[in-house]
Amino acid sequence: MGLLKPKLDPAIKAKKERPGVRAFVSVDCIAGLSVPAKAFCQIYYLDDRIEVDTPDTEYSISMERVRNISIQREFYEKSKITSSMGGAFVGALIAGPTGAIIGGRPKEKQMVHSASFLVIEYTGADGASAQMVFDATYTPKCKDMATLFRQQHPIAAQAKKQVTL
């Protein structure tokens, strides 16, 4: 990310600065809404509801139906195979053709990457449990929404999840 932030659309800025908006983020939607993958959405956290604006639809969920707002992290490993022309050259200088083969051999590098997700769990209109997932990897302000929810709804945020296997 650069030092300069892009200017916010005037309509989004006006909506963000309404009275009652406690937190605001613009993130990509991963799952849970009927929008194309990686659709850019604006999420507004208000005292009585959560509003999610997608490119073509506006969603509103009352806080009575929101069960939890959390940040979840996922770690994954990536391996990259590289060979070195410089290693082959130095190996050739030191030990001839055999050194070139040994110095230029492929090497495997393991890298650990992480991704963060803003997860909003709620009870749908039909009474079933549902969730919306947004990419929060490069948006640290998503943590503000989870913190606000924990402060306003400490019992709901600490409730244990029950998983049936």
Image (tube, rainbow, N blue to C red):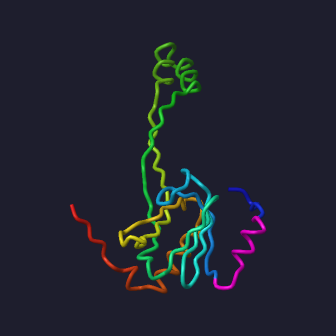
Q: Nearer the viewer, residue 28 or 99?
A: 28
Give above or below for 27 relative to 78: below
Residue 113 picture location, percent across and down: 48, 51
| Quadrant (top left, top right, bottom left, bottom right) of the C terminus | bottom left
Q: Residue furthest top?
A: 97
Q: Quadrant of the N terminus?
A: bottom right
Taking the spot 51% from the left edge, 14% from the top edge, the residue there is 96
**Residue 107 higher or lower than 47, as above or below:** above
Tell which residue pokes out farthest to the left in this image.
165
Asked whether, in this view, residue 41 is left or right of residue 82, the answer is: right
Please indicate whether residue 45 sits to the left or right of residue 162 in the image.
Answer: right
Which residue is depicted at the point 69% across and 75% down? Answer: 16
Q: Position of residue 58 (x, y in %)?
A: 60, 67
Which of the 4 quarters of the picture holds residue 93? top right
Task: Give the side of residue 3 with respect to residue 42, left or right.
Answer: right
- The residues colored magenta run 8-20
Q: Nearer the viewer, residue 92 or 120?
A: 120
Residue 95 percent coordinates (x, y):
50, 17
